[in-house]
Amino acid sequence: MLFSLRSSTPIIFAALAAMTSQGQAQTADETARFGQLERVFQTATIVGVPEIADCTLSGGSTAKCFKITVVAAPSDHVTGPFCPRTIADTAQDGGTWFVDGEVRDVDGDFIARLAEVYDDDAWQMHDPETGDVYRRAGEIGCLVAGDPTNETGQPDNICVECELGYVGKTVTQTYFIPLIPVIAAGTGDRIGPNSGIGLAFNGVKFDAPAPLDLILGGHTLGPFDDCTGHINPHTGYHYHGVTEGCGARVAAAIEGHAAMIGVAMDGFDIYDRLNSGGAEPDGLDACRGHEIEGLGYHYHANRTAENQVIGCFTAETGCSTDDPDAPCDASAPQRRPRP
Ligand SMILES: [Zn+2]
Ligand SMILES: [Zn+2]
């Protein structure tokens, strides 16, 4: 939509306010979507103010993106615990982990029985004399969580945890989410190792799948807390699954439909897995999306233990980065994955 100088004064102001730094006004649909996203992300801990920014999406399309910088920590629930201290600790003292497609409590007993759980006698994550769990916590835990392959002399069989207080700085994440999704060529974009899946309304990233093979290959665990999130010094606190009762929800515009929990990196909304009747919607596509009247196309979250919040992206994705000043070119090669 073009704004004429003969328009009434408030419209001119609105148009100017909606200009991007590159100077090109967006469409009315983009403006409306921006206002909607600004409202639903009020529950995040926002740094600065959200704006409309030019972005290059994963398929090379140029678009207008919702740009928001958030503190990478949940605004509405505590984080941890992650690793139990001893093999006598209960589920309240530890977090969770994915085993064979199920969410398991990482309590002391789980640590004690790892060799059995993974059918591999090389697992021994506690001191047989004292029952103490072998952990890497504090600053060193964050170092290992940020780069599990890099610590020289790192022993096998450690439970790694990083807490926000030991990261040494406030981690922020800056997101560029397309205001109007640009449908991807082909059958849907794969979820890359470093793109992230989306952003929850409480400011937490839905991250790419945790690299379980890499972690387990070193006989290590990087437990999630009971909200299926954990921390590394690059991404801050992030989720690997959607968990009931964790994080802000926005009621759907349709009665009985699952509540909305966040927005995917391709600009489509993500809703809870189950509708209010307790059933998963029929007819979801491979990306776990469907289109229904009143809500348009949207995703429903996977089962928590699938380690991947949605199946794939239907549209081209924007960017997430820990550099608040970086531009967004999602078509550029990705960096290596992080836990
Ligand atoms: Zn739905
Ligand atoms: Zn992770």
Image (cartoon, helix red, strand yellow):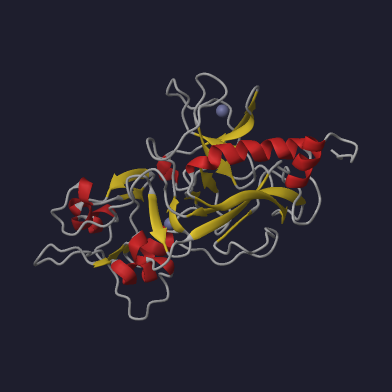
User: In the figure, is residue 295 to the left or right of 273?
Assistant: right
Tally of numbered tags: 0
Identified at 39% across, 35% down, the residue is 244
Residue 170 sits above or below residue 70 on the image? below
Mark yes or no: residue 84 visible. Answer: yes
User: In the figure, is residue 164 to the left or right of 106?
Assistant: right
In percent of width and height, residue 185 lies at: 74, 46
- Residue placed most toward the observer, 24 or 260: 24
Which image quarter is the N terminus in? top right
Instruction: Give residue 131's quadrant in the image.
Output: bottom left
Residue 285 sits above or below residue 97 on the image? above
In percent of width and height, residue 209 lies at: 48, 53
Which image quarter is the C terminus in? bottom left
- Residue placed most toward the observer, 183 or 17: 17
Identified at 37% across, 35% down, the residue is 245
In percent of width and height, residue 34 lies at: 66, 40
User: In the figure, is residue 137 to the left or right of 36?
Assistant: left
- Residue placed most toward the observer, 219 or 237: 237
Mark yes or no: residue 190 visible. Answer: no
In percent of width and height, residue 203 lies at: 49, 48
Q: Give the image quadrant in which the ligand numbered 1 is located.
A: top right
